[in-house]
């Protein structure tokens, strides 16, 4: 089939060779030289410079860390329909600045990405922008209604080659419909990514259920509403022998359910967001909708549990759940505020702060959880590949010694609803390369 999801929109590879001097691949102590040519890694080591074209661009990386380009399995780009909050172009700019070379665009657009026509529209627009690979996620049900399955096979067979399907933002709460979806996607090696939220347990819910929600007078969102759906769905996945992915896992109980399922041999993967790795329900005391997110920020104990789960591999990946919102949807009272936070530009810094600096993960581990495994789950060709000769030159260069004081006006996103304003993050993206072409250099878009 022509038109693979990772093919470049315009073949800019090979315009000029690039040589990176003194780069620490995967965080290794010893720095090496690496050369890109024709969109691929052409050489690593002494020959990288010796055999370079005389017109090659030489970049002194000065011991910074090189990882495979990051892959996000959970991004909201809002286009089509809510271009006031984000466009594919502005979202891809944020992605490139965050070190991403591929993002999966969630289906809750207007119109919903529930047909081959809509997913191809999103895919083609991503190719036109050319800053990262935009891989559409197809809706599980028509219009996210939870009533009838969408055109899953048609989306899978389209030019976009959809392999991830999700009604994210809404749970597929009907167990029979969820079973049918899991059965259906087996035919083309797809995966159902579930937004785990039992709707009847979360009516008008506003924040994590507990003593603090009672104190603040906000309707509680119980952990069991997430855990019950995950427990049900891992059993359904086992029953039909299909792949299940759990979106934005947030509680200790959810970690335990996924750990149990994996021990049983069930084909389940799970993600955690950067904000659930760092922030807690205490921020709701401000009544600032900036901290209103779905699922809600949880307790300190939950934060510790998801960090442990990510470290030991129970949680497979970090996914941003990048959720831009127009100013008026966040600059309001808590109850009226939209759920969601930006995530693409700050993700690597949050992971560095919560997982790398404390010693829970190495940079090689980060590459697995933010590039290799998400590409594998999404069946994305050409992304998350080893940094080896002959492989596509998709790479992020991270400066672990360049703290970044986050400000809203630094966001490339059309929205500014980042929860990390005034946070100093301990690492930043120095450069991003998509098939050997720089999209970001010295921390700025090229």
Image (cartoon, helix red, strand yellow):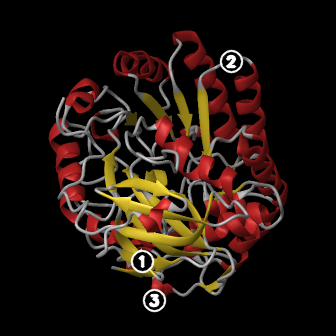
The percent position of residue 74, horizontal first and vertical second, equals: 46, 51
Left or right? Give the position of 112 relative to 221: left
Q: Quadrant of residue 300?
A: bottom right
Report which residue position mark 1 lands on.
58
- Quarter placement of the N terminus: top left
What is the distance, in whole Å, between disc 2 and disc 1 at their CAs? Answer: 48 Å
Up/down of 78 relative to 242, above or below: below
Element marked by disc 2: loop
Depth check: give the residue in front, 120 or 329: 120
Up/down of 107 relative to 328, above or below: above
**Residue at image x 42%, y 15%?**
183
Which label's residue is closer to the chain start, 2 or 1? 1
Report which residue position mark 2 lands on.
265
What is the distance, in whole Å, between disc 2 and disc 3 at their CAs? Answer: 46 Å
Depth check: give the residue in front, 170 or 430: 430
Which label's residue is closer to the chain start, 2 or 3? 2
Q: Is there a contact, CB below 8 Å, between mark 2 and mark 3?
A: no
Image depth: mark 1 or mark 3 in front? 1
What is the distance, in whole Å, between disc 1 and disc 3 at their CAs? Answer: 31 Å
The percent position of residue 14, horizontal first and vertical second, equals: 25, 61
**Residue at image x 48%, y 44%?**
385
* Neighbourhood count class around disc 1 (C-alpha, 10 Å): few under 14, some 14–19, many 20 upward: some
Left or right? Give the position of 112 relative to 105: left
């Amino acid at each position: 089939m022509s038109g693979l999801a990772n093919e470049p929109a315009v073949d800019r590879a090979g315009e000029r060779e690039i040589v990176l001097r003194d780069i620490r691949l995967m965080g290794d102590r010893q720095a090496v030289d690496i050369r890109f040519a024709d969109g691929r890694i052409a050489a690593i080591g002494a020959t990288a410079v010796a055999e370079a074209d005389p017109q090659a661009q030489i970049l002194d990386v000065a011991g910074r860390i090189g990882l495979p380009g990051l892959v996000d399995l959970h991004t909201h780009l809002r286009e089509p329909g809510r271009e006031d909050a984000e466009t594919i172009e502005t979202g891809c700019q944020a992605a490139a600045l965050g070190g991403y070379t591929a993002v999966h665009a969630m289906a809750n657009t207007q119109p919903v990405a529930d047909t081959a026509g809509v997913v191809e529209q999103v895919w083609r627009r991503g190719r036109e922008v050319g800053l990262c690979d935009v891989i559409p996620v197809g809706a599980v049900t028509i219009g996210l209604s939870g009533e009838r399955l969408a055109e899953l096979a048609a989306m899978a067979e389209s030019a976009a080659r959809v392999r991830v399907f999700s009604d994210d933002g809404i749970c597929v709460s009907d167990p029979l419909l969820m079973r049918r979806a899991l059965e259906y996607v087996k035919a083309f090696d797809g995966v159902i990514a579930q937004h785990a939220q039992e709707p009847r347990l979360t009516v008008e819910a506003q924040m994590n259920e507990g003593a603090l929600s009672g104190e603040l007078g906000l309707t509680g969102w119980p952990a069991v509403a997430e855990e019950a759906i995950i427990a049900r769905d891992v059993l359904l996945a086992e029953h039909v022998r299909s792949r299940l992915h759990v979106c934005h896992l947030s509680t200790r109980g959810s970690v335990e359910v996924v750990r149990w399922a994996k021990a049983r041999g069930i084909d389940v993967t799970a993600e955690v967001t950067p904000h659930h790795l760092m922030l807690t329900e205490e921020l709701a005391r401000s009544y600032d909708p900036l901290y209103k997110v779905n699922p809600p920020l949880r307790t300190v104990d939950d934060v510790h549990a998801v960090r442990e789960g990510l470290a030991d591999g129970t949680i497979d990946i970090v996914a941003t759940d990048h959720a831009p919102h127009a100013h008026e949807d966040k600059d309001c009272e808590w109850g009226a505020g939209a759920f969601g936070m930006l995530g693409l530009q700050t993700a690597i810094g949050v992971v560095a702060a919560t997982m790398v600096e404390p010693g829970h993960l190495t940079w090689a581990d980060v590459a697995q959880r933010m590039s290799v495994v998400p590409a594998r789950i999404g069946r994305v060709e050409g992304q998350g590949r080893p940094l080896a000769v002959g492989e596509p030159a998709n790479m992020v260069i991270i400066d672990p010694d360049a703290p970044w004081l986050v400000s809203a006006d630094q966001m490339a996103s059309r929205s500014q609803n980042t929860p990390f304003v005034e946070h100093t993050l301990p690492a930043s993206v120095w450069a991003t390369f998509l098939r050997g072409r720089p999209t970001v250099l010295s921390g700025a878009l090229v």
